[in-house]
Image: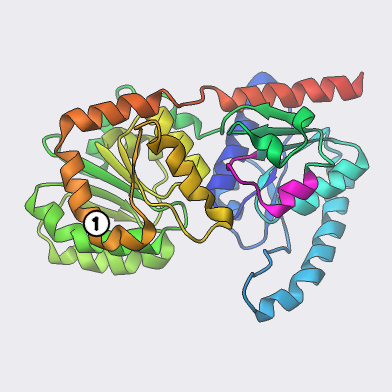
Amino acid sequence: MSGGGTGGHIFPAIAIANAIKTLRPDTEFLFVGAEGKMEMEKVPAAGFNITGLWISGFQRKLSLSNLAFPFKVISSLLKAKKIFKSFKPDAVIGTGGFASGPMLNVSAKLGAVTLIQEQNSYPGITNKILSKRVDRICVAYSGMDKYFPKEKIILTGNPVRQDILNLGGKRERGLEQFGLSSNKKTILVIGGSLGARTINESILNCLEAFEKNGIQLLWQTGKAFFEIANQAITRYANKGIKVFDFIMNMDYAYASSDLVISRAGAISISELCLVKKPCILIPSPNVAEDHQTKNAMALVTHHAALIIKDNEAREKLCSETLALINDIERCDKLSENIGRLAFQDSANAIANEVLRLINIKTK
């Protein structure tokens, strides 16, 4: 398994591994990540072994770090080859992130079953190149034959953390765990696993209004903004504002919430569809081909979410949030519509495809 950099690459990989493990308990797993990235912490926490490559992305703007990029690629390809020959995998699955490119490239050449799990509606350059070499490409959006060989594509949706698949009975336990009241509305803010500065700064502007309106807040800030947010909430008497750099128990966070404010990353979108939460999406403008806006619009066109542009969030988020959370009928309609867009059992679909390809290759 190779993928990382953000939760959007890590958690699908873990979900697929767990699905394969359920189907074939005798399977051995090795994750390959990028040294110093969050997968080196999150994967062992999920119970899997991981090794790291010396690899990072190429900066689009002028940067001295780009001078090391060719050496990192060569180093990673050599180490990936060494890992392959030592572990001898039957299959290698890439879910995106810096490390998956070298690992899949080497594995395809050396004869393992290779599979890409592409989460987004617009793939990155690495997956476009790898698509010509791998055996299968599992996608979450239709129309991906614009980018990938049509005969290799299978529409599976995005795998998500298993614990969010069933939130039944978790609301009260979640509210208790976070120290929140069951008599007040709760907003969950998730800027992605690394945080989102625009969302965080917009929420800072909302704190006073949330307190006046008796709104509770579960706020995942990411590490970079955590101290700023933590200091800011000390000015408010409302004990229902909870700040975290990272929320591990997202099932309880989703179950506790009445409304979600989020970026529009592919995995966040998939999770929101499955948990059927009314949401306000603020797509990141700092992604290739503005694919987060395309992800968000896939919901908006089905009246399944609201969208606020990144450059308008600081001005509009507070009023839009208060208007929505107090409109029960509108929230119920958004919840109903977003639930219709959910892909069920994506991890199992991918796991079965991997095992099928292995069986074909070993016959």
Q: Which residue corresponds to the image point at 38% horizontal and 38% vertical from the top-left?
A: 300
Q: Is residue 229 magenta?
A: no
Q: Residues within 10 Å of mark 1 (few under 14, many from 20)?
A: few
Residue 172 shows in the view: no
Left or right: residue 153 versus residue 316 is: right
**As drawn, 122 above or below 228:** above
Q: Quadrant of residue 10?
A: top right
Magenta region, residue range: 118-130
Q: Quadrant of residue 222?
A: bottom left
The residue carrying mark 1 is: 316
Left or right: residue 270 versus residue 159 is: left
Residue at the limit of the structure toward the bottom, as seen here: 64
Residue at the limit of the structure toward the left, as seen here: 212
Q: Which residue corresponds to the image point at 61% horizontal and 23% vertical from the top-left?
A: 348
Residue 91 shows in the view: yes
Residue 124 lies, in percent from the top left, at 66, 51
Q: Which residue corresponds to the image point at 41% horizontal and 59% vertical from the top-left?
A: 196
